[in-house]
Image: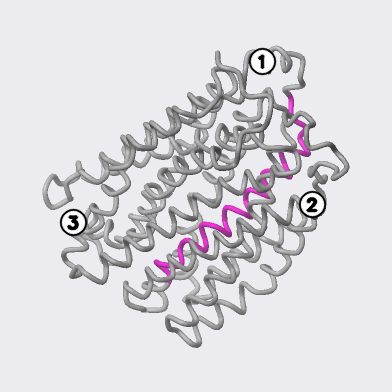
Amino acid sequence: MPHAPEESIPLAKVFVVGIGNALEFYDFLTYSYFAIQIGHSFFPAAQTAHGLLFSLATFGAGFLTRPLGAIVIGRIGDRAGRKPAMVLSFGLMGLGITGLALTPSFATIGIAAPILLLVFRLLQGFALGGQVGPSTAYLIEAAPPQRRGLYVAVQYMTQDLAVVAAGVVGYVLSNRLSAPALDLWGWRLAFLIGAAVVPFGVYLRGTLPETLTDRDRDAIEHEPRRLSTRLIGLALVLLMATTIGGYGLSYMTTFAQDSLRLAAGVAFGATIMNGLGNLIGDLMSGLCSDRFGRKPVMLVSITLLILLVLPGYLAMTHVPGALTLYLVTSVLCILQQVFGNAALVTIAESLPTAVRATALATLYAIATTVFGGTTQLVIKLLTEGTGSALAPAWYMTGALAMGAVAVILIRETAPNPADSPRTSHRR
């Protein structure tokens, strides 16, 4: 078993974790951005609104297997090592995305098409459920104590690079292809672009040094493995708020087409702004939470989010257009990521090393299954049920208000600035 280096792993090397993470999230989130086109391909007999509902429901089904993937792959990460768990989750994601892209349409194979679509979404959910825990644990353990926030920001930064990539691909395809071509094969091409880089990602992850060594396993044999009910509850509420906020904002592409009646090309521009705003927020969160602490950063960002979400949606519905859409999307996404990144670091630092990968993956999977997997479907149902385009704003505001309470109650986990930078980085 290889040993991790005595010193922390350089940030440039840690970005290899993020590259694999970016590819996984590109594949997973591309489904969301092409939900309308996928609905046309696999549920063509329904009206457009209902076809979109079926497509979003299938997207949500991918979250059902996240807890199982979190437990299975997370335990591999805590026992065999972080690296093999990350390689396994990435390979399974590649299998799922390739199968989804190559599944024939309903018009070609009938009911087997949506069934296969569901199977591959479940496989993707299983893989992604086991991705977050081991990779975040790796980043925490690879970082110097005073730079954990920045290192874990890599987790979100690379996800958001994937958002930008998905947005650029969608924007180009939607502007260069006709609507029938986009429905027929354009969305498949977007998935295959992600699948093409799977071998590259598997290779890169295989080159990483392991952070969970034999010496670490001996040291954590006597570490507590039970988590307090209070910590579990606060972590779930924080993850609920970040998940609903994040997936609510990733719905912006569909919201722009379905509620604001904007062209697909304009809508995919919002995806690009989503990714760019998230990237800025990630970097700000990592740097600021390392300098000022996790709680102050979370409190400021979530308070601003609560105050700005509803006015932002009011602006988009009263002055629909590219400028308003892009401005609101970018501002809200910056604040969302400042909050979400600091929250993830807080939770990861609160968990004992012995169960960090499994516990974090499981908590994350539960939150995203219950809330993330249903967010876009709930938003669509609330919009139809109330007839109000402001439904997404009210839903996100309620979740963020609950998250703010959890921020106040959870303890600060940032290391004391007086701590030596050479202090052991495993907590």
Foreground of the two, 248 or 268: 268
Q: Residues within 10 Å of mark 3 (few under 14, many from 20)?
A: some
Residue 1 magenta-highlighted? no
Q: Name the residue under label 1.
A: 217
Quadrant position of residue 45: bottom left
Q: Tell me, for residue 198, which label it has, or none.
A: none
Q: Residue flagged by tag 2: what amino acid is it?
A: Gly
Q: Which of marks 2 and 3 is nearer the N terminus?
A: 3
Q: What stretch is highlighted in magenta?
A: 226-255
Q: In which quarter of the image is the C terminus?
A: top right
Figure check: 408 above or below 7: below
Whether label 3 touches label 1, CB < 8 Å:
no
Dot 2, crowdedness within 10 Å: few (<14), some or many (≥20)? many
Please name the amino acid that badge 3 sits on: Trp
The percent position of residue 337, horizontal first and vertical second, equals: 61, 58
Q: Distance between the residues labelled 3 and 1?
A: 49 Å
Instruction: Looking at this view, name the residue that lies furthest to the left.
Output: 108
Q: What residue type is labelled 1?
A: Arg
Q: Residue 293: which numbered mark, if any?
A: 2
Main SS class of the magenta portion in the image: helix
Counting labels gives 3
Work out whether residue 410 or residue 417 is closer to the camera in this orientation and state it.
417
Q: Which residue is drawn at 37% across and 31% down?
A: 91
Residue at figure coordinates x 57%, y 56% from the top left: 244
